[in-house]
């Protein structure tokens, strides 16, 4: 889907966020960008989304063009819902901006909400929903156009462990159903190990790729008590140590 070659990004204030990032993103991949706060994970995600531009290097999309706006879904750290709008109207928003009427969008909106476990909550406003449910609405909004690429920036970081585990399992189901490519930013080793097929470790600023680890766990249906999950967590932890020492 996308090849990043020697990508760098320096902000106007002189902060060098990324240096020499080279990464292949394959169609259908589930990639976790894992690293400490401030290592450039979110910056890299914004570059992939087209919300920012690199200062150096090349981003080459398959077919020679970036996905159209409707082909990329983005889930931010905060649910960022319109507080005065219902769950359904929040999910409708990306389609509305593309000129799709409420009536025309209704089947897709209902399907997206049902996909994240919110069937029956179409008319609920954000203030009536828990934090986990608001994040589910945000994910449904990103999924409503059935994107080819789903970008997620630490979407579960502020949630309690029970809610986070449930959403992680639901996300794997969504990924399997849609067959989309997912790039997921996290600073949790356990979250990266549970979700991703490829774990890309980033070093502290300026962000560089320190290592990449492939997961041999089943794409779904595995348990956090599976010994292979514990082994993967150990492998990731050991791979991160040299990068942290070098920093």
Image (cartoon, rainbow, N blue to C red):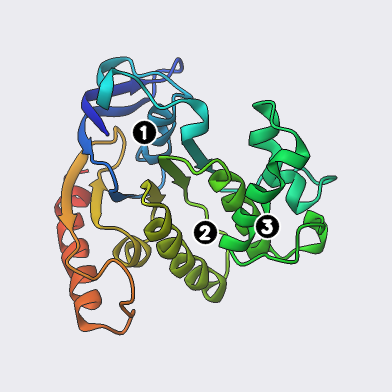
- Which of the labelled discs sits on residue 114, or is there none? none
- Looking at the rendering, which quadrant does residue 23 occupy? top left
Q: Position of residue 200 (x, y in %)?
A: 24, 48
Q: Earlier in the sequence, mark 2 or mark 3?
A: 3
**Number of numbered labels in the structure image:** 3
Residue 226 is left or right of residue 54, and the answer is: left
List the single residue furthest toward the right: 84
The answer for how far apart the CA atoms under marks 2 and 1 are is 18 Å
Q: Earlier in the sequence, mark 2 or mark 1?
A: 1
Q: Position of residue 14 (x, y in %)?
A: 39, 18
The answer for how far apart the CA atoms under marks 1 and 3 are is 25 Å
- Quick one: quadrant of the N terminus? top left
Residue 81 visible at all: no
Q: Position of residue 52 (x, y in %)?
A: 45, 22
Q: Earlier in the sequence, mark 1 or mark 3?
A: 1
Q: Which residue is mark 2?
A: 156
Q: Position of residue 230 (x, y in %)?
A: 23, 77
- Give the class, few, some or many, for how many residues have Cα within 10 Å of label 3's Cα (few <14, many ≥20): many
Dot 2: element:
loop
Q: Which residue is mark 1?
A: 44
Dot 1: element:
helix
């Amino acid at each position: 889907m996308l090849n990043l070659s020697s990508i760098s990004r320096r902000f106007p204030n002189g902060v060098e966020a990324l240096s020499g990032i080279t990464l292949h993103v394959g169609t259908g991949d589930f990639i976790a960008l894992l690293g400490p706060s401030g290592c450039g994970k979110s910056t890299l995600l914004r570059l992939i989304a087209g919300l920012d531009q690199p200062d150096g290097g090349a981003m080459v999309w398959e077919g020679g063009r970036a996905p159209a706006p409707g082909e990329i879904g983005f889930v931010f750290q905060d649910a960022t819902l319109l507080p005065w709008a219902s769950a359904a109207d929040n999910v409708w928003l990306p389609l509305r901006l593309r000129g799709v009427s409420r009536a025309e969008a209704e089947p897709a909106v209902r399907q997206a909400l049902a996909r994240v476990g919110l069937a029956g909550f179409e008319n609920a406003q954000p203030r009536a929903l828990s934090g986990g449910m608001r994040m589910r609405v945000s994910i449904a909004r990103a999924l409503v156009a059935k994107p080819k690429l789903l970008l997620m920036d630490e979407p579960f970081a502020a949630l309690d462990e029970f809610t986070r585990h449930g959403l992680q399992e639901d996300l794997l189901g969504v990924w399997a159903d849609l067959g989309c490519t997912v790039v997921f930013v996290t600073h949790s080793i356990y979250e990266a190990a549970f979700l991703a097929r490829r774990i890309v470790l980033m070093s502290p600023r300026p962000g560089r790729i320190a290592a990449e680890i492939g997961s041999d766990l089943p794409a779904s249906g595995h348990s956090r008590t599976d010994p292979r999950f514990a082994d993967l967590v150990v492998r990731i932890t050991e791979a991160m140590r040299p990068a942290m020492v070098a920093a």
